[in-house]
Amino acid sequence: MTLRVSIFAAIAAAILLVTVFELMRSRRLQERYALLWLLTGLVVLVLAVWRGLLGRAADITGIAYPPSALFVLASFFITLVLLHYSTVISKLSEQNTILAQRLALLEGRLREAENESEH
Amino acid sequence: MRRGSEGAKPTRLRRLAIVPALNEAGSIESVIREIRAEDLDFEVLVVDDGSSDATAALAEAAGAQVMRLPFNLGIGGAVQTGLQYAREHDFGIAVQIDADGQHDPSQLPQLLAPLVAEEADVVVGSRFLGERNYKAPLVRRIGIRVFAAIVSAVVGQPLTDTSSSFRAFGRRAIAYFARDYPHGFVESVEATVIAARCGLRLKEVPVVMRQRVMGQSSLTLPLSIYYSIKVLVAVFVGIFRRNAYELED
């Protein structure tokens, strides 16, 4: 694997880590949604710098060209992040439904109370 | 509501006991009864964090104010709901007491003393000050001490127990935390950092905790590891964060 690929991957991972950190610092990203991104950035950074480990991982998985292994791994983590978001969206939409229902019930009770106090 | 905010006694700060509860039907009544038995003039607010058992009904029957969250928000969201109630109804003091009975309401006077003397804005009941009888697995005790050491270094004040949820908040702390409070589980560590960094005065007092009346701690090992990492990241990022709001006087 050429040194250039390693340097490029390391810089990309570092940019990701710094961006995630800055988003957390400015309160635009909550910790619980940042952890997977941080893990992704750290794994890519470690494998980009520690080229021996990447070579071994490529050997084990039968990937002839080590930089491809880095690419595969990054794709795997991005898939994980997306899957995580799918569960988060599911939960949010569920909670949104519950909120709308509770609000409708509350409005109904409020109207009832208002009507009663008018009579 | 039993007392409107305009009916407050002028000489004494109104006091709210916030009891966040998730499926604590077995212990909630005795906790409310014990708080009342102390006769410290507390209004008891149970924040039901999405229980599927009779917690809310039992709490209401025992004479507490009850707020039912539409779904589980986690302990931080539940506590903040209580603090928002405290702010809206002009309570000068709010304490947080666990619904599982491990906090002993007879120790409320110690917890309140620094607030009443206006020496602190947040008072934490520490399990590691004074008489130590805190019985928990070694790993958990070590974890609590490690967090305390890290947070002490971050806030520049020696603290022994940042994971304790037996806490009292003064007016300034209520006003700040009503707007900015960490959500999710094990929020007290982050809350300590936020409090110190926004200028709230922290103080620890020794408390002795009881064994849980019902059930075990809800934390399993993988969850503990996850929360530990999350809290460590949050504390680290917190060092570089500006306050979300200015402290009000």
Image (cartoon, coloured by chain):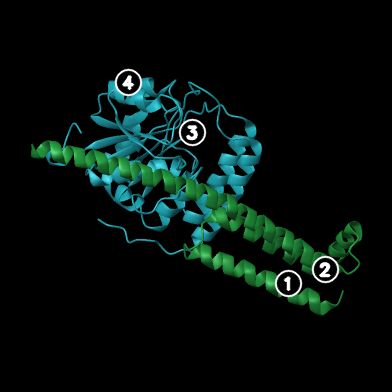
Question: What numbered label is drawn on residue A68?
Answer: 2
Q: Which tag is nearer the camera, tag 4 or tag 3?
A: 4
Chain under disc 2? A
Q: Earlier in the sequence, mark 4 or mark 3?
A: 4
User: Do the CB atoms of the residues marked 2 and 4 lie less than 8 Å apart?
Assistant: no
Q: Are marks 2 and 4 on the same chain?
A: no
- Residue at image point 39% right, 24% down: B28
User: Do the CB atoms of the residues marked 3 and 2 lie less than 8 Å apart?
Assistant: no
Helix, strand or loop status at disc 1: helix
Residue B208 visible within the image? yes
- Measure how far apart labels 2 and 1 are at the Cα level: 15 Å
Q: How far across and how far down the image is residue B198, in percent?
A: 38, 58
Chain under disc 1? A
- Measure how far apart labels 4 and 3 are at the Cα level: 23 Å
Question: What amino acid is at disc 2?
Answer: Ser
Question: What amino acid is at disc 1?
Answer: Ala
| Quarter-of-image position of residue B103 | top left
- Measure how far apart labels 3 and 1 are at the Cα level: 45 Å
Q: Are marks 3 and 1 on the same chain?
A: no
